[in-house]
Amino acid sequence: MSADLVIILTAILVAVPCALLGSFLVLRQMAMMGDAISHAVLPGIVIAFFLSESLGPLASLLGATVFGLLTTVLVQALSDTRRVKEDSAIGIVFTALFALGVFLVSKFARDVHLDLQHVLYGEIAYAPLNPLLVGDFDLGPRSLWTLGIVTALVLVLVGLLYKELKLTTFDPGLAAALGFAPATVHYLLMGAVSFTTVGAFDSVGAILVVAFLIVPPATAYLLTERLSRMLLLAVAAGVGSAVGGYALAYSLNVTIAGAMAVVAGLLFLLALLCSPSHGLLAHLARQRRNGHDFARDLLLARLAGLGGHATPQALAAGLGWEGARLDRALQHARHGGWIDRPREGEVLLTEKGREAAHRATGRLRPAAVGRV
């Protein structure tokens, strides 16, 4: 298997579970939980090193997973006190545990190869160089085995608990009333996030994991209102970021993880601009359309108040509009068939326009109608 293919497959095996779990984090407004876990597990890795006297992948994974779950429990415990909001609880817990990890490294691990660069910032370019050895057998890149297992477990979890995750995400009160145990589902989700985050440390580092946890789900959130479709779109955005990011890194000779995060950000920006329901361009188009409709309603209401016919000069004086604004409103109303201009210098309401004027008068506030 080529090194290029190993890197791409490794990134995809990170993107898929992160996209699935991150979608639920985004919907629960806990997007930064992945970032919190990725930093709070540092003392777990250090303690695992002290206990096992090695920084093997199994020891690191176990230590990090324990502290990832501890982070979840502490954040939930602080939130349950109702004295601290959830975002503040996340910040308090992850900074405290991360600071503890930094302290342990600086105090007790100065003379060993254990540093923040090794722990937090894995390099995906080295994935083909780290084989999984069982005795004398080389089973291939370790990242594919580790992340393949993580991806399979996350797919099983989401598949088996899809209904429970959906219900507890959108209506935890109803879920509790139906006996779905929202707290248990929450801890299972957070445990999966913790396991996924620390499982990818050695291969890609926490930074890329956090990017895949947040950006593709946020992109999908802008594009659909259905959870099932959001999960598929998030996975597609994550896989596209992995493949497109590697192509960008290869062409520009830049860091692979950074290029993947950049492509993910570009996809989010594209969705932010072009989403049919939440995009900025669609919002501007709705604002412009609403402005045209409001101006048309004012015009029709004023024209009805003048008996259904008036000169443009009378309309401009009554509405307080300059000529260009009045011309645009007249053009819009005439195009829609609400007015007619059979003779130069006069504007007439059509039958359709009279009906629209009656409805517009009911929609407009009395003060606005009075001003026209």
Image (cartoon, rainbow, N blue to C red):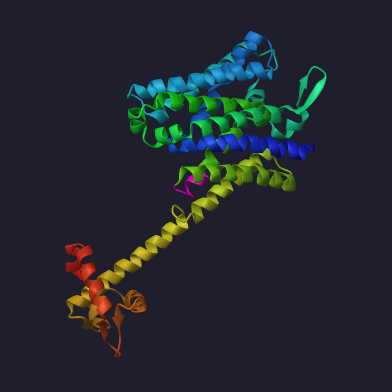
Judged left or right of residue 218, residue 339 is left
> Which residue is more in the foreground, 116 or 67?
67
Who's the residue at 25% across and 83% down the image? 348
Classify 360 as above or below 199.
Answer: below
Viewer-closest of 166 and 301: 166
Q: Observer-nearest residue: 69 or 245?
A: 69
Figure quadrant of residue 52: top right
**Residue 152 spot, x, y in % from top left:** 61, 31
Q: Position of residue 53 (x, y in %)?
A: 68, 10
Give left or right: position of 72 versus 82: right
Which residue occupies 39% across, 61% down? Answer: 286
55 horizontally vs 92: left or right: right
Above or below residue 257? Residue 74 is: above
For this view, does 243 lie left or right of residue 94? right
**Position of residue 110 measured from the top left corner of the image (x, y, whole percent):** 66, 14
| Segment tinted magenta in the rendering | 219-225
Which residue is rendered at x = 32% and y = 24% of the image? 82
Which residue, as the protein is rendered here, is positioned at the far bottom? 343
- Residue 121 within the magenta-colored segment of the rendering: no
Quadrant position of the N terminus in the picture: top right
Location of the C terminus by quadrant is bottom left
Up-down relation of residue 261 to residue 357 (above or below): above
- Inspect this view and state whether residue 319 appears: no
Residue 349 visible, this angle: yes
